[in-house]
Image (cartoon, rainbow, N blue to C red):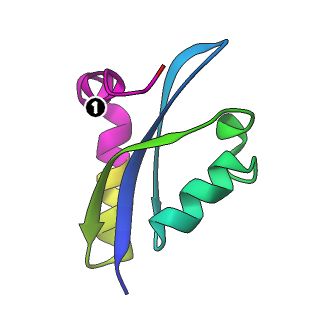
Amino acid sequence: MDFYTYVLGSTGKGGLRTYVGWTTDLARRLARHNAGKGARSTRGRLWTLLYSEQHASRSEAMSREWHLKRDRAFRKKLAKNVPV
């Protein structure tokens, strides 16, 4: 089984936002976020996949998610690609 770490981007009345997570199915997870069934902080927004990485294990994906959540410079650079 493959595991993915991903970064989503969205613009809205609260401004530009990014979200970092991990999953085993990117397409399904993005659809759930956009349907309002993802994390509470992602509800009510239209999200775009900005970046993803594939990992061999769940622990690798979760570790990378932890690091990406703290890498604000990287997320800010990705946020420039969010459609307005």
| Count of numbered tags | 1
SS class of the residue under badge 1? Answer: loop
In the displayed structure, would residue 81 be above or below residue 26?
above
Image coordinates for residue 22, horizontal then vertical, percent: 45, 59
Q: In the image shown, does 35 or 59 lie closer to the viewer?
A: 35
On whether residue 38 falls in the magenta region, the answer is no
Q: In the image shown, does 84 or 59 lie closer to the viewer?
A: 84
Image coordinates for residue 65, horizontal then vertical, percent: 37, 51
Image coordinates for residue 14, horizontal then vertical, percent: 64, 13
In the displayed structure, would residue 24 be above or below residue 37?
below
Spot the residue most to the bottom: 1
Residue at the image position 37 percent from the left and 73 percent from the top? 3
Image coordinates for residue 21, horizontal then vertical, percent: 47, 51
Magenta stretch prevailing secondary structure: helix
Quadrant for residue 13, please give it: top right
On whether residue 67 falls in the magenta region, the answer is yes
Magenta range is: 66-83
In which quadrant is the N terminus drawn? bottom left
Residue at the image position 24 percent from the left and 30 percent from the top? 74
**Which kind of residue does numbered mark 1 sit on?**
Asp
Q: Which residue is mark 1?
A: 71
Pointer 1 local density, CA inside 10 Å: few below 14, some 14–19, many at least 20: few
Quadrant for residue 5, please give it: bottom left
Residue at the image position 48 percent from the left and 71 percent from the top? 25
In the displayed structure, would residue 33 be above or below residue 79?
below
In the displayed structure, would residue 1 be above or below residue 84?
below
Judged left or right of residue 13, residue 5 is left
Residue at the image position 40 percent from the left and 27 percent from the top? 82
